[in-house]
Image (tube, rainbow, N blue to C red):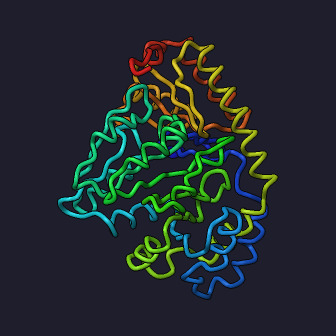
Amino acid sequence: MAREFGLDPNGVLKLASNENAMGPSPKAVEAAAQAMRHAHLYPDGSAIALREKLAEVRGLKPEQIFVGTGSNEVMVLLAQAFAGPGDEIIFGEYAFIVYKLAALLFGAKPVSVPMPGLAHDLDAMADAVTDRTRIIFMPCPNNPTGTVVDPDDLKSFIRQLPEHVIFCFDEAYAEYLDEPADLRPLIDEGYKVFCTRTFSKIYGLASLRVGYGYGDPELIKLLNQVRQPFNSTGIGQAAALAALDDHAFVTRSRESNRAGLKQLTEGFKRLGLDCPPSEANFVLMAVADSRKVFELLEARGIIVRPLHGYGLSEYLRVTVGTEEENTRLLGALEELLAGPDAASLKGESERR
């Protein structure tokens, strides 16, 4: 983009990939630097130290935890292990696109369920279950809409699922919530629940690609049969291990994100732009012509995410930045509204 528009790469503002505006965990950076001294050695393929630490932090057993190359790989391996031709995988129509891609990758039928008001409809998802359903994917907060599902309603939904269905709960943005849904009791009760988390978001380690899943030990054993050896790096494991103790950084990131969400939401509304509520580290902004606005912002050195691939062509997804970064974006939008391209911005969503 810098080459195309003749911009200084250091001045480009990227608000497109839901990365942590605070950067990486300082403790993780230090641990990664130390781990680089052993970069000539293969990592622990079983990620024993990280799994033991995760078990301690999350109140689980090490054998309940599976470590992967980001939570993306973990979910794809779940589909590989449990779904194939003739099977079905269910997800919300505006949910993370990897769920659909995972189904297609292994020949399963993707089943997209409508999401009125940009939120998951649990009754509609229950109605979509058939004897061919193998996995239901659901993120909370949802990417890209930022909506959440009521924990009690979610637990009731899971308890009604038939035995042959695995419910995969994608918690990539859970650390941004004050009280995220806790499905560990259902796992203990024997329900087929598998949850995934990542170090890419609130811990700021997206470049190192570390994620994990947790569930029944027998399910974890099956996932280990389909994963590649050394599927998480030693440097990533060391960084993730240290990040789990960086409580101050997580708190700062959560507080900064909360303030940034408020700044962007109020700023969008002040400019007359529709902005559905979000509980994640990103927020949607409705515009009349999302491709045009995306290009106009690019020319100003600001990258946001158009959502045509999700069927949300009237929205742009904006990652929460620092106060200065958010101010820069809002200033650019204000300039556009005062100029000849104002018509491309003004528009309201019909999906409220």
Residue at the far front in the pictured view: 189
Residue 255 placement (x, y as % from top left): 75, 39
Front residue of 90/2: it is 90
Query: Measured along the vertical axis of the image, is residue 83 above or below residue 220?
Result: above
Residue 20 placement (x, y as % from top left): 65, 48
Query: Measured along the vertical axis of the image, is residue 16 above or below residue 247?
Result: above
Residue at the far left in the pictured view: 86
Query: Measured along the vertical axis of the image, is residue 202 above or below residue 308?
Result: below
Residue at the far right in the pictured view: 248
What residue is rendered at 34% in x and 62% in y? Answer: 79
Residue 217 placement (x, y as % from top left): 50, 73
Residue 60 is drawn in which quadrant? bottom right
Front residue of 345/211: it is 211
Residue 151 placement (x, y as % from top left): 55, 41
- Left or right of 350: which side holds 203? right
What residue is rendered at 78% in x and 68% in y? Answer: 30
Please state the total of marks drawn on the protein image: 0
Residue at the far bottom in the pictured view: 41
**Image quadrant for the C terminus?**
top left
What residue is rendered at 64% in x and 26% in y? Answer: 264
What residue is rendered at 60% in x and 17% in y? Answer: 334
Query: Measured along the vertical axis of the image, is residue 54 above or below residue 176?
Result: below
